[in-house]
Amino acid sequence: MDLPFDITNETTKLAEVRDREEEDLAHILSDKYGMSYVNLLSHNIDNDALRTISEEQARAAEMAAFERVAKVLSIAVHNPNNPAYVKLAEDLTERGFTLKKFLISEKSLERALSHYADLSLAKKSRAGIFTVEPEMLEKLTKESATRDILEHMLKDVSAEKSLDHVSHILQTILAGAFALRASDIHFEPREKEALLRLRIDGILTDSYLFDPATYHQVNSRIKLLSGVKLNVTNRAQDGRFSIVKNETQIEIRASFIPGAYGESIVLRILDPAATLVSYTELGIHPKLLARLEREIRKPNGMLLTTGPTGSGKTTTLYSFLRELQKPEIKVITVEDPIEYHLDGIVQTQVEGKKYTFAEGLRSIVRQDPDIIMVGEIRDGETADIAIQAALTGHFVLSTLHTNDAAGTFPRLADLGADPKSFGSAVTVSMAQRLLRRLDPNKKKERPLTVDEKEIIEKVFETLTDRSLVPEKIETVWEPVAGSPEGGETGYKGRIGLYEAIFMDDELARFLRDNPPESDIRRFTAKQGYPTMAQDGILKALAGITSLSEVADTIDLPQ
């Protein structure tokens, strides 16, 4: 039996041949016109370059700008004999541009011109800056900002047919995130829709579903604002932009990663108001706080705070820096990236292999600082330089990724630091977590169960300062949740759980043999400061948070 002729396959092959011939012809003609040749089908197009020529001018002149470095502009031309192209090239030269001219095929021109559709989505905002209208923010705030109100508003603006509807969608999302006190905005594309989720008080909550076409427009708009490449969708990209909110500028850190159904986006909201929080308002236990206030004022030493990503370590360090900052003190930081800008402090940012934490720290020491903050100790070289800085008259603040305060010392040893130096260098090892705070107007008291009492007694067994244990342990508080659709959980805001180990001669001798974490935990219990678990139970008994929230955040004995 005769096999059917595959028309689709043959048509595809013919189209590919024609495309190759078109590119070959453009390559040959480039010599005739004294230009270089470029294939824009496989070339990145720079948004800043594209923006130098309006779409109307580009179409009339059959050309597009695709790369810009300072005043050197690379332009792609399809028809050098077009009078509109000649005039436009003269205009660009008069504007101070040095032109690098390339000949392109018609297919390349179509691709370049198609990018104007993405640019047009943001024609009312300049790149890198986005403004949230006060009226939008006020409307959401007045309506007590619940997720269902945000959903209804997004449904309305998504149905708009105006040219600015993408701006209105993004503005509504950002205003809703601010009103709901979200720390992160997540866009997660699926097969038939894209899910918008907000991280509120540390918990991700579903907020809205976009159709694929609308999500593509929002995606392009965010990429444009973030300064990343619009036409790159097969690899991760990071960018950032600023939001003007009530005359305050808020930084947004944007992360894009490829997925099965499109790019997933996470926007991290870096509100400078977070750095204005005093260290006395973070939730540190009064006994621990009194000791920390003395320790951070020492002329040299090292304070390390540990915990997973998102546990508030940077906020804690910034609050200490604000307390220590004085005109007569020089403070320098090396961060990755700089999340919040602090006046009166020299802040530097690592840049891949060109400027690492270790290299930055080595340079900082030569700048004669009194206080140094290192965003994170990630390797042995950084650990060694930080320890040497602490030993030579500097006070160093930094972070580590460990589970608790006792894990700091084995972690430093794993990085190659000498345990014999810990006693002279590290003055404080802290650990912290964030947990949700009960809304004072939406909580109720209830008696403890027998099992809960047993758990609490086990937690307090190792607390040597018995004066910290409440006399009566009978009741705890729990949230009175409202409408789940509206996101009324009974919690409002977050508070920290903290623990700390303070260096003394006895502990320094004990650490010289690099003991395991469990032994360090038992050895330091006699210092009398509450652990994170004990701090959490104390907060639950005081009605600051719920027992279930503590159990979800910290491992409690069973």
Image: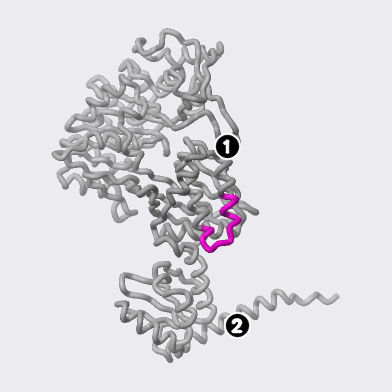
Amino acid type shown at disc 1: Gly
Q: Which residue appears at 52% of the width and 39% of the height?
A: 143
Residue pointed to by mark 1:
486
Q: Position of residue 334 (x, y in %)?
A: 27, 46
Q: Which residue appears at 40% of the width and 24% of the height?
A: 532
Applied colour scheme: one colour
Looking at the picture, tell me which residue is in the foreground, 427 or 498.
Answer: 498
Residue pointed to by mark 2:
18
Classify 173 as above or below 460.
below
For this orientation, the residue located farthest to the right is 1
Q: Of label 1 and label 2, which has the lower sequence position? A: 2
Mark 2 surroundings within 10 Å by alpha-carbon count, few (fewer than 14), some (14 through 19), many (20 or more): few
The kind of secondary structure element at disc 2 is helix
Are the residues at dot 1 and dot 2 in contact (C-beta closer than 8 Å)? Answer: no
Mark 1 surroundings within 10 Å by alpha-carbon count, few (fewer than 14), some (14 through 19), many (20 or more): some
Q: Which residue appears at 47% of the width and 10% of the height?
A: 473
Q: Is residue 235 left or right of residue 92?
A: right
Q: Which residue appears at 32% of the width and 39% of the height?
A: 275
Amino acid type shown at disc 2: Arg
Q: Position of residue 535 (x, y in %)?
A: 40, 21
The kind of secondary structure element at disc 1 is loop
Residue 107, by quadrant, is bottom right
Q: Which residues are magenta?
A: 154-166
Find out whether residue 290 is within the magenta segment.
Answer: no
For this orientation, the residue located farthest to the top is 471
Q: Is residue 255 visible?
A: yes
**Quarter of the image with the N terminus in it:** bottom right
Q: Position of residue 134 (x, y in %)?
A: 43, 48
Between marks 1 and 2 in the image, the one whose residue lies nearer the viewer: 1
Q: Is residue 275 left or right of residue 490?
A: left
The number of discs equals 2
